[in-house]
Image (spheres, rainbow, N blue to C red):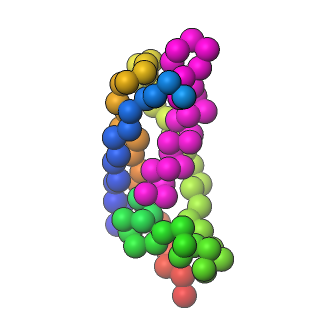
């Protein structure tokens, strides 16, 4: 079963590059944040991963740039969990 998780984030000054656009590296950071938030909604948080000495691994990232993002604009990063297995 696939579950799409969506979040809404706002670009701040600290997210901008020298051209005052959201830095490409920031999108990857947001993907990491959304992946953990998604995992938490599925019932497994960071404390659980530490306790179990395991973690959910993202095998693929995809960024689709629709337009340049500027300060105070909102972005909607999404996460899709599929093909995951429960730990024994």
Q: How many marks?
A: 0
Q: Is 83 situated left or right of 18 in this image?
A: left
Q: Position of residue 6 (x, y in %)?
A: 34, 48
Residue 22 seen by the camera? no
Q: Position of residue 60 (x, y in %)?
A: 57, 49
Q: Is 4 situated left or right of 25 in this image?
A: left
Residue 75 seen by the camera? yes
The magenta span reads 15-37
Position above or below: 87 against 47: below
Q: Is residue 74 magenta?
A: no
Q: Is residue 31 magenta?
A: yes
Q: Is 60 situated left or right of 67 in this image?
A: right
Q: Position of residue 18 (x, y in %)?
A: 61, 14
Residue appearing at x 54%, y 73% in the figure = 47
Position above or below: 75 against 79: above
Q: Position of residue 30 (x, y in %)?
A: 50, 42
**Residue extending farthest right:** 53
Residue appearing at x 43%, y 29% in the figure = 11
Decide which of 55, 64 is in the foreground and name it.
55
Tell me where residue 73 sits by quadrant.
Answer: top left
Decide which of 18, 38 is in the foreground and name it.
18
Residue appearing at x 35%, y 46% in the figure = 7
Q: What secondary structure is the stretch in magenta mostly built from?
A: helix
Position above or below: 29 against 82: above
- In the rendered image, which quarter contains the N terminus? bottom left
- In the rendered image, which quarter contains the C terminus? bottom right
Residue appearing at x 42%, y 65% in the figure = 40
**Residue extending farthest top:** 19
**Residue extending farthest front:** 13
Decide which of 26, 62 is in the foreground and name it.
26
């Amino acid at each position: 079963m696939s579950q799409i998780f969506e979040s809404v984030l706002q670009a701040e000054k600290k997210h901008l590059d020298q051209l005052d656009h959201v830095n490409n590296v920031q999108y990857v950071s947001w993907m990491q944040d959304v992946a953990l938030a998604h995992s938490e909604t599925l019932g497994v948080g960071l404390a659980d991963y530490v306790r179990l000495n395991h973690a959910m691994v993202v095998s693929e990232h995809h960024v689709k740039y629709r337009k340049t993002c500027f300060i105070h604009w909102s972005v909607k990063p999404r996460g899709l969990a599929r093909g995951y297995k429960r730990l024994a």
